[in-house]
Amino acid sequence: MRSALTSAAWIGLALSTASVPVSAQQGGDEKQMTCDNGRYDGDRARHCEIREQSLPGIGRLNVDAGRNGGATVKGWTRSDVLVRARIDASADNEGAARSMASQVWIDGSGGEVHARGPENIDNSWWSVSYEIFVPNNTDLTLKSHNGGLNISDVRGQIHFEVNNGGVHLRRVGGDVSGSTVNGGVQVDLTGNTFDGRQLEVSTRNGGVTISMPSNYSAHIQAETNQGGIRSDFPLPMDGSTGSRPRRLDFHLAAGGPLIHVTTGNGQVSLKRSDTQ
């Protein structure tokens, strides 16, 4: 069931609530998160609602997606922050699920975004996922326990930690680092070289794919313990034959900022984005 914005759940926040139309979003960014493809729990009743909150941009944002939620963060050219939160709740009946969702509060004060709500008891549960629009130069710290992370068009000091979930980075820059324990990592880079200090990402269980244009310049370091490295780009001759290498350290084209990727159990793929 889809619900309109419930203002009562925002009582106690020292921030104004506002809905920003798509036409007002600069840079072509569009709202995509809906309740159409939410979580389902067998025959139990489910309630889903979307809430929105406009915050002042202060140059940094820390997002904790909680135990069972993911987050998508998109950079835009505006100076404010738009937090869209999808609250999912499941209980024995529709009224109980709606009541549980109404008790979930989203706190966005002081550059911190996190949710709090009732205890999950008697096979009832709630979770919150986020779609957040931020100024392009925002510093980000993101955490997720069971849920993926997506970051696009942000240049800043970016750090993320994920336990169970994949990570997708698109057109990011600055100083980027982070890891996931169980999940793959996809990085899509554009331009001629990395716009920033470095990018360093890792996963314990999952593959890592770096997609770059044919003329991209970078210092590449890639490592895998249980898998090979596959590349669309020419690799340095290291004297090895047969199986794919498991460790590489080389300059791509003219070299540049460090791109360091690591996986414990998975393959590393270096792909040409303009030939796919």
Image (tube, rainbow, N blue to C red):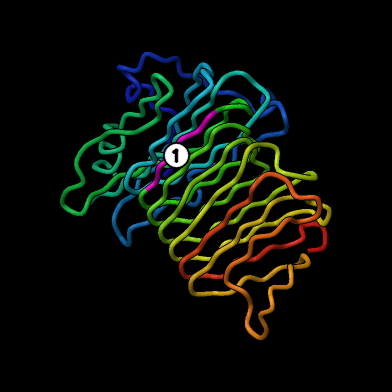
Q: Disc 1 designates what residue?
A: 142
* Observer-nearest of 173 and 259: 259
Q: Disc 1 marks which amino acid?
A: Leu
Locate residue 184, reporting x and y percent: 52, 61
Q: Residue furthest front?
A: 239
Task: Name the quadrant containing residue 275.
Answer: bottom right
At 74% across and 68% down in the image, what residue appears? 235
Vertical position of residue 267 compared to residue 25: above or below: below
* Observer-nearest of 119 and 152: 152
* Observer-nearest of 96 and 107: 107
Locate residue 65, reporting x and y percent: 39, 41
Could you tell whether 136 is left or right of 41 in the image? right
Could you tell whether 45 is left or right of 268 in the image? left
Q: Residues within 10 Å of mark 1 (few under 14, many from 20)?
A: many
Q: Which residue range is magenta in the image?
A: 139-144
Task: Label the magenta part by its dominant secondary structure.
Answer: strand
Number of marks in the rendered image: 1
Q: Residue furthest bottom?
A: 242
Locate residue 61, reporting x and y percent: 47, 28
Magenta stretch contains residue 140? yes
Locate residue 148, reporting x and y percent: 47, 51
Q: Residue furthest left?
A: 122
Q: Secondary structure at mark 1?
A: strand
At 47% across and 70% down in the image, what residue appears? 265
At 29% across and 49% down in the image, what residue appears? 90
At 73% across and 45% down in the image, what residue appears? 256
Magenta stretch contains residue 3? no
Q: The C terminus appears in which quarter of the rendering?
A: bottom right
Q: The N terminus appears in which quarter of the rendering?
A: top left
